[in-house]
Image: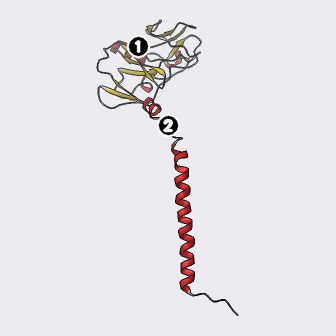
Amino acid sequence: MAHTETSDTTTRRDFLYIATGAVGAVGAAAMVWPFISQLQPDASVLALSTTEVDISPIAEGQIVTVQWRGKPIFISHRTPAEIKAAQDVPLSALPDPQPDQDRVKAGKDQWLVVIGICTHLGCVPLGHQGQYNGWFCPCHGSVYDTSGRIRQGPAPLNLALPPYNFVSDSKIVIG
């Protein structure tokens, strides 16, 4: 005798398979979600990922140091003389040639923002020091100009530039 099924039985069975699979998938997702969410960075880590700085109190010719991701960031409000000195340097005289306009934001060349870590061995250079009135690393004698470019000493590269943007005329966000 041949086995016969009605279309109602097939439909009911298919529905039960689909419903069981859906409940199982939702249950698995509910179990996995806490494990995935715990991999997200902590709120304190996210808070350190960007730093907002009010630059309005920084006087012309002044260098301010702020922290971003545990690194010192030098924000220099350059004078017209410092800008001109940085722009007039021939690139052939630089160990790591980079024009001044590539190291500042367009239209905001009075503001230089660099990571304050010497590219030789990771020391923190001193501002308004050295032959070029930029930064001087007392550990091994690296000298940087007013654009943060290496001019003499053992450091192989210019001071690094952090990612930053001007959110207004008086505030920048680093990171």
Q: Is residue 69 left or right of residue 169?
A: right
User: Residue beneath label 1, please?
Assistant: 85
Q: Which mark identifies residue 50?
A: none
Q: Spatial distance from mark 2 to mark 1, Cα to Cα?
A: 43 Å
**Which residue is at the front of the view, 118 or 27?**
27
Q: Is residue 11 left or right of residue 4?
A: left
Examine the rendered structure and indicate whether residue 37 appears above or below residue 6.
above
At 46% from the left and 13% from the top, the residue drawn is 145
Where residue 169 sits, quadrant-wise, is: top left
Examine the rendered structure and indicate whether residue 12 appears above or below residue 125.
below
Rendered-image quadrant of the C terminus = top left
Q: Secondary structure at mark 1?
A: helix
Q: Position of residue 164 (x, y in %)?
A: 41, 29
At 32% from the left and 27% from the top, the residue drawn is 171
Q: Amino acid at mark 2?
A: Pro
Q: Position of residue 81 (x, y in %)?
A: 35, 12
Q: Position of residue 106 (x, y in %)?
A: 37, 29
| Within-10-Å neighbours for mark 1: few <14, some 14–19, many 20+ | some
User: Residue beneath label 2, please?
Assistant: 41
